[in-house]
Image (spheres, rainbow, N blue to C red):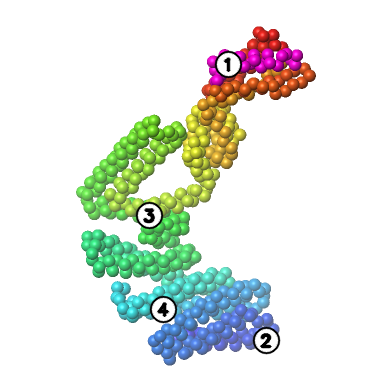
Amino acid sequence: MKRWLRGAVLMIATGVVSAQVLAGTGEMRVAGLDDLEARIAYIEEMSLITGDLQGADRDGLQFRLDQLMLGALGSANMALLEVMALEPDAGVVVRERAETLAIWLLETSISRLEEIYGRINLERSAHDEFEGGVSAHVSRAFVQDLTIVVLEYMNALGSLLRVAEQFGASVEGERDIFEQFVVRNVEQLHGQIRLDAQTLSELRRGLAADASNAGIESALRAVGHKQTRNLANMAAWLELLDDLGVDTVSHRSLLIQQRGRIGTEILQRGVFATIWRDQAQRIWRNAARNGPNFILQLFTFLAVLLLAWIVAHAIRRALKMIMDSSLVRLSQLMEDRLLSLSFGLMFLAGIIVALTTIGWSVMPMLAGLGVAGLVIGFALQDSLKSFVAGWMILVYHAYDVGDYVQVAGTEGKVRRMTLSSTRIATRDNTIKLVPNRKIWEDTIVNLTASRARRLELEVCCDSGNDMDQVENAIRELLAEHPQILNRPRPDVYLSGHGTSEMTFLVQPWVRTEDYWAMRRALLKEIRQRFEREGIR
């Protein structure tokens, strides 16, 4: 109360001096400062009433004063920015007036924070965390409301400090007090979170041994709710520490480990490394405390890994036998991918089980790896598209190793395929590595997917020849040729007739593997048949 009264006298004196100087110099009044002084005057007027109130009435009015103070802190930001926008020679008194108001608000708000924390401690001492009843529940809700007010004060103070420093105000002392206040509360929260984490572990072990114990279950639920609130408050406090330039790596790693889920904290430098280091230290402490049990744990870890490797190989061999049977028809590419995937997943499960046996908590690690994978995924979007496209190609059996394909402007034989790319050998034996995403986004033509292919040849002869004789000669050759299929039947028909020549279209069917050889040889054999029968 004394601070509020002293502030009122200071505000009145400051206003008088400012008015006198402005009247004597003719300087323009700053609207933001006038509004701020009006706000503070009203706050002072209302604060005088709180001393005459008790209980809920006093708490209600004090809550209203806190909201007014938060509004004044925001107005102070705007007023300082308004003064900063003035010309440097606009008036020293105006700048001093603005600085005085800002410093008073900082000091008064920090003092109010101490009062709020005193009230929070009083409420907590009056009602135990595990106490039931209406009064206890109301008290805990009131404490949570006060905690929210504290965080609002902290954000407003941090913002005003930054603007005041830009303004050039002498707020080093207020900044130090503010920073000490934040650090002290964060460290207190850090310790409480770790203590409650140990308590939760003990309660869970107790509940596992006695699942029907309602008291343990109730205590576990109460401590869990408290831990959840503390973690949420810690996250809000850490934002303030970041603004103050204080290292928060250890606190953020604690958040991830205790939440059991990922957050943006993992992206900050050092947080992921701290989590790994904490887990390693935990294993080391367990080994030192357990002594001879460490050797047994190490043996168990290696034994589980060996067993996982053996089981993974056995499953891979069993899958291979099933895939090689006549009951299952899969492409070679699909078989390779499924075999690799089955081995990898089984061995990964073995690694997780092995880590669990020695007390390594894998959830924070998996959470960290999940975020790291997300970050890498954004950086390697094209590679991920190729990976997904690789699976789509496998699922739809678009092609297999050894097939002759036309994909993404490339034609050749598929030599090898991974989930990210396909290796294709062209006719001149040039090896091309094509990303799967380009293949999947384009039309895929598999020229060897069927057992038979149709040749299309154009045969020309002099227009003076008998058309039936020419057609019969071609049909007889096709019927006698051992590499020409009878079914589907080959087609031979006149496709063009000019003044000097006739053109016949020859469409025989051949086995896919004979396609290129017959394409080169058949035209020559037809010409030789024409010469023997006198067809020009």
Marks 4 and 3, how far apart at CA: 35 Å
The reply to whether residue 254 is in sight is no
User: Given this view, does label 2 or label 1 mark the residue nearer the observer?
Assistant: 1
Q: Where does the image place residue 53, in percent across and percent down from the top left? A: 42, 90
User: Given this view, does label 4 or label 3 mark the residue nearer the observer?
Assistant: 3
Q: Residue furthest front?
A: 468
> How many neighbours does mark 2 have within 10 angstroms: few (below 14), some (14-19), or many (20 or more)?
few
User: Given this view, does label 4 or label 2 mark the residue nearer the observer?
Assistant: 4
Residue wearing tag 3: 364
Q: Earlier in the sequence, mark 3 or mark 1?
A: 3
Marks 3 and 1, how far apart at CA: 73 Å
Q: Earlier in the sequence, mark 1 or mark 4?
A: 4
Q: In the rendered view of the protein, which quadrant contains the N terminus?
A: bottom left
Q: Find numbered disc 1 in the image and state the secondary structure of the residue it sits on.
A: helix
User: Given this view, does label 2 or label 3 mark the residue nearer the observer?
Assistant: 3
Identify the mark at residue 24; answer none if there is no mark.
Answer: 2
User: Given this view, does label 3 or label 1 mark the residue nearer the observer?
Assistant: 1
Marks 2 and 1, how far apart at CA: 120 Å
Marks 4 and 2, how far apart at CA: 43 Å
Q: Which amino acid type is marked by label 3? A: Pro
User: Given this view, does label 1 or label 4 mark the residue nearer the observer?
Assistant: 1
Q: Contact, CB < 8 Å: mark 4 with mark 3?
A: no
